[in-house]
């Protein structure tokens, strides 16, 4: 069994990292460093610290001690005496208190926010991994196209020299030399365009992922049938989906917030102590008080809105599950179908290449026309290029399947 198949079989039952580095991809340790240095990933990591601070805030509560100070002047005008004036002051210390049960819910809400931020960090890592994989294979495909056109130009150059020799010997017409030169010019134009696309893809890869070595692998793996059933892969994709996990955690947090808002319909009391000095010190007053807001329509509406929001989040979770399952089915089926598609393309390329070689021998023996040979070369070149791209498509789909199932670059 090939190492690549063993790699998949090792991962089908768990989420461990690959036992050996994938042969078609950059080194795993470099990929990990590049992905963790991505600005979007670092922003998601910073958001975790934000939510940790928010959790501390929720656990501590928003209520704080308040101090009230006041001063006043009292004027007394008794009928039997002269006017009197007294300087007086008062002070109070008060604080609202959360009713029993609310603090626990606030702690749950803070923990849910941290969990959500951690999942968002994993999602940012995963999306960056997807982008890297896509950009990497885009570069490989453009490199394969450039290499194929290099081979085609080399063949046509060799063919052109043969036609020139035959023309010099009087065994070929001028029109054949013109046709050969035109075919070579067309191939060279295609090679130039392929090289430009290759350089553009390489530069895009370098710019998006600084530090990633843009070095082509020594050789490409041959895609094989993906082990495991479709159902196993679909379940793994759903289980490991950050998008679904985010939707589920959003629904859970919305439920907690709905519970918290429901409890808020019973307002928190404010408890305070006050002291005052009246009649220039003749009277000293010490007392305590409790202030309780009266619940109104605004609190009821806020609670109803939170309940409705929880229902919305639950619906979004269901929609996310439906979407991810549909995408998982499409990905698994595409990855499974890509292997026989590549095999058929390879067989077609091999047969058309043999046909082109036979046509070339026939032309050398004077039994065929140059037009037939050029057509055969063109068809063989198109088939070979198609086979190379089909191979890369199959490998990309396989790696994408492994990546989404957390059997490749699992960096969370």
Image (cartoon, rainbow, N blue to C red):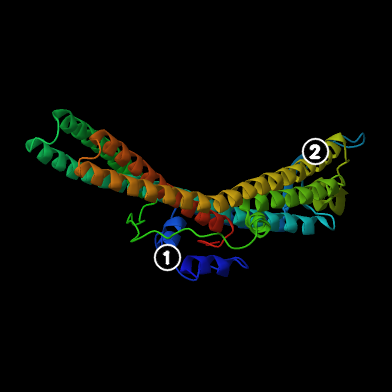
Say left or right for 78 vs 141: right
Location of residue 244 in the rendering, given as x and y in whole percent from the top left corner: 67, 50
Q: Give me the residue at 27% from left, 39% from top.
A: 373
Q: Which residue is mark 1?
A: 29
Location of residue 145 in the rendering, given as x and y in whole percent from the top left corner: 34, 45
Q: Are marks 1 and 2 in contact (CB under 8 Å)?
A: no
Say left or right for 37 vs 232: left
Image quarter hosting the C terminus: bottom right
Residue 355: which numbered mark, if any?
Answer: none
Instruction: For mark 2, give the secondary structure.
Output: helix
Say left or right for 241 vs 307: left
**Which residue is at the front of the view, 342 or 284?**
342
**Which residue is at the front of the view, 253 or 397?**
397
Q: CA distance from mark 1 to mark 2?
A: 48 Å
Q: Give me the residue at 27% from left, 37% from top.
A: 374
Q: Give me the residue at 41% from left, 48% from top.
A: 387
Location of residue 278 in the rendering, given as x and y in whole percent from the top left corner: 82, 47
**Which residue is at the front of the view, 87 or 397?**
397
- Name of the residue lying farthest toward the top: 175
Identify the image quadrant of residue 168. Answer: top left
Location of residue 160 in the rendering, given as x and y in whole percent from the top left corner: 17, 39
Q: Give me the residue at 63% from left, 54% from top.
A: 241
Identify the image quadrant of residue 288. Answer: bottom right
Dot 2 crowding, Cα within 10 Å, few <14, some 14–19, many 20+: some
Instruction: For mark 1, give the secondary structure.
Output: helix
Identify the image quadrant of residue 197. Answer: top left
**Which residue is at the front of the view, 216 or 183?**
183
Whether residue 219 is situated above or below residue 282 in the rendered picture: below
- Name of the residue lying farthest toward the left: 168
Dot 1 crowding, Cα within 10 Å, few <14, some 14–19, many 20+: few
Sequence-wise, the earlier of marks 1 and 2 is 1
Residue 305: which numbered mark, if any?
Answer: 2
């Amino acid at each position: 069994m090939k190492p690549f198949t063993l790699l998949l079989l090792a991962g089908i039952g768990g989420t461990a990292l690959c036992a050996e580095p994938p042969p078609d991809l950059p080194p795993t340790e470099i990929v990990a460093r590049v992905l963790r240095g991505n600005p979007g990933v670092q922003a998601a990591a910073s958001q975790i610290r934000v939510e940790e601070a928010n959790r501390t805030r929720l656990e501590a509560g928003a209520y704080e001690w308040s101090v009230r100070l006041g001063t006043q002047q009292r004027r007394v005008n008794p009928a039997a005496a002269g006017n009197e004036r007294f300087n007086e002051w008062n002070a109070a210390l008060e604080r609202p208190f959360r009713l029993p049960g609310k603090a626990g819910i606030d702690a749950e809400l803070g923990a849910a926010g941290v969990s959500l931020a951690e999942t968002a960090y994993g999602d940012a890592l995963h999306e960056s991994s997807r982008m890297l994989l896509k950009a990497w294979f885009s570069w490989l495909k453009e490199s394969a196209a450039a290499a194929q056109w290099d081979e085609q130009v080399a063949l046509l150059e060799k063919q052109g020299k043969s036609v020139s020799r035959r023309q010099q010997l009087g065994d070929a017409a001028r029109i054949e030399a013109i046709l050969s030169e035109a075919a070579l010019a067309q191939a060279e134009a295609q090679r130039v365009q392929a090289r430009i696309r290759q350089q553009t893809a390489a530069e895009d890869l370098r710019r998006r992922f600084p530090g990633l070595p843009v070095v082509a692998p020594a050789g490409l793996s041959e895609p094989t049938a993906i082990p495991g059933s479709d159902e196993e892969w679909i379940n793994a994709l759903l289980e490991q989906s950050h998008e679904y996990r985010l939707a589920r955690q959003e629904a859970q947090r919305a439920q907690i917030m709905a519970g918290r808002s429901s409890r808020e319909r019973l307002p928190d009391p404010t408890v305070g102590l006050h002291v005052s000095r009246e009649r220039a010190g003749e009277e000293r007053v010490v007392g305590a008080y409790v202030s309780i807001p009266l619940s109104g329509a605004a609190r009821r509406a806020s609670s109803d809105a939170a309940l409705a929001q929880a229902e919305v989040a639950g619906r979004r979770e269901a929609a996310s599950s439906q979407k991810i399952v549909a995408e998982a089915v499409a990905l698994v089926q595409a990855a499974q179908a890509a292997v026989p598609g590549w095999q058929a393309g390879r067989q077609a390329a091999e047969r058309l290449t043999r046909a082109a070689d036979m046509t070339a021998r026939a032309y050398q023996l004077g039994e065929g026309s140059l037009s037939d040979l050029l057509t055969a070369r063109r068809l063989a070149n198109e088939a070979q290029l198609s086979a190379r791209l089909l191979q890369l498509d199959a490998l990309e789909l396989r790696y994408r399947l492994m990546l989404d199932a957390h059997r490749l670059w699992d960096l969370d």
